[in-house]
Amino acid sequence: MAVGVLRPLGLGDVLDGMFRLFLRHWRAYLLALGAVLVPVTLLTTWLQQDLVVGAGLLEILDDPLAAQEAAAADPLVVDLVAGFGGQLAVNLLVSPLIAGIATVLAVRGFLGEEVSASGALATAGGRYLALIAANLVTVAAVGATGLIIALPILLLVFAVGAEGLGIVVAVLLGLPVAGLAMLTVYVLLLVAVPAIIVERAGPLAALGRSIALVRRRFWPVLGTWLLVWFIAAVIANVFVWPFTLPATLFGGTTALVATALGGIVGGLLAAPLVPNALALVYYDLRVRTEALDLEAMAAALEHGEEAGPA
């Protein structure tokens, strides 16, 4: 993938590009993302400490009663609520900023512009409210889509007084349909973040922009996103696992420290991948549907510059 060359990008180009961008500018990625991920991971780990800190496997094997005593002493419901609340806050308030930072770095790296951690933090921070608003609208739109499809099915089941097998059949038919509809809405909104960063669009305008771009190439975008998401998940788990092992074996403070370190390492290595790929998908969609590459070449010629090959 040549830097700064706007052209149609195949699946291989996107996969290659999402790794190359990270490896080429790894210092900027680690510094910028670390400024957000490290404190947030430490905070969420602390909120869930009563779920993390407990008897380790070695202690349980040595004293089987240790696990029962630890479980009896922990206020599990309170811990679950705190952990869930912390993770929900991260998903709604922090994840959009992380995606924005990675997108800024990916866009600047792809276009051959200056890439710096401070610049990425400043640019994404300046668009933070738009990123949060777009994320909230996306969550609401996906949830509403599922509810609109699932609710009539549930009402019909209760209206006809279905029992047993009828309820099972309704659920088995309704859930996949609702899930596919929710997935469709989510995919249509995938490139809203690049639109917010590149075009400085407002949240609703960016979501509409994403729909306009993705709907013309829905299936390729869906396939690319699923593959990239799977790769990122595998990488995150591969790098978290070495920290999970000592946490499981030793428990206690060791588990708390290992869990925090695993979350930081896995997050720093996996978090940029999906935003990187979506930034490239965004440019690919604009090239294919809006001839962005030709516009760039014309602008370069107009300014007396040599345009790169498309």
Image (cartoon, rainbow, N blue to C red):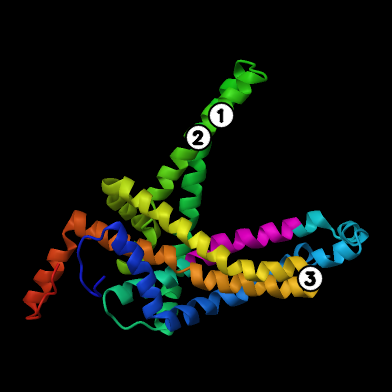
The residue indicated by pointer 1 is 172
> Can residue 184 be seen at all in this image of the molecule?
yes
Mark 3 or mark 1: name the one nearer the start of the chain. 1
**Type of amino acid at the residue the image marks with label 2:** Pro
Residue 237 higher or lower than 124, as above or below? above
Q: Which mark is residue 21?
A: none
The image shows residue 224 at horizontal and vertical percentages of 36, 54
Residue 53 x, y percent position in the rendering: 79, 67
Q: Which residue is mark 2?
A: 176
Q: Are marks 2 and 1 in contact (CB under 8 Å)?
A: yes
Residue located 26% across and 47% down the image: 216
For residue 29, side relative to residue 40 (left or right)? left
Query: Which image quadrant is residue 11 in?
Result: bottom left
Q: Badge 1: how crowded within 10 Å, few (<14), some, or many (20+)?
A: few
In the displayed structure, 126 sits above or below 88; it is below
Q: Label 3 belongs to which residue?
A: 250
